[in-house]
Amino acid sequence: MAGVNIDKMSLKELVELETKVQKAIAAARDRERSELKKKMSELAQTHGFSVAELFGGGRGAKAGAKGKSVGIARYANPDDKGDTWTGRGRKPNWLVERLKKGAKLGEFEI
């Protein structure tokens, strides 16, 4: 970076420089965030997961939504690992059917 002598700059020049620096910082954060998301996605996929499975952030969630989040899935359908249940609310049909046949809830824990 070229040597910038801020002591000799006018107020107008300093404000312009500050604006440029803020824009450069925002661009660098966006760039690094994007690179990190890509790396995390690749790492998750190599282990058979998606980033959404690991960290949440489903499409239905609204930014700044009030209230408690439901949490992560604790139980999975052995026939379809994408079919999960958090342990809250009504039990899914696949789980109810298996429990009626004598299965234990612990058998479906993730």
Image (tube, rainbow, N blue to C red):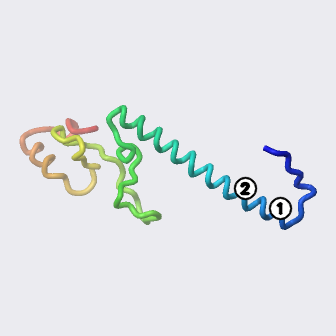
Tell me which numbered mark, 1 or 2, is placed earlier along the sequence. 1
Badge 1 amino acid: Leu
Badge 2 amino acid: Val
The residue indicated by pointer 1 is 14
Q: Residue furthest top?
A: 46
- Which quarter of the picture shows residue 99? top left
Residue at image location 93% in from the left, 57% down from the top: 8
Please state, as top left, top right, bottom left or bottom right, where the N terminus lies in the image. top right
Q: Residue furthest right?
A: 8
| 72 or 26: nearer the viewer | 26
Q: How far from the left and from the top, in percent, is residue 11?
A: 87, 66
Q: Are circles 1 and 2 on residues that touch, CB within 8 Å?
A: no
- Which quarter of the picture shows residue 24? bottom right
For label 2, count other residues whose C-alpha is less than 10 Å away and answer few (under 14), some (14-19) or many (20+).
Answer: few
Residue at image location 43% in from the left, 65% down from the top: 65
In the rendered view, does 79 fall on the left or right side of 10? Answer: left
Q: Secondary structure at mark 2?
A: helix
Q: CA distance from mark 1 to mark 2?
A: 10 Å
Q: Name the disc covering residue 21, or none.
A: 2
In the rendered view, does 59 fall on the left or right side of 99? Answer: right
| 45 or 95: nearer the viewer | 45
In the rendered view, does 110 fall on the left or right side of 6? Answer: left
| 41 or 58: nearer the viewer | 41
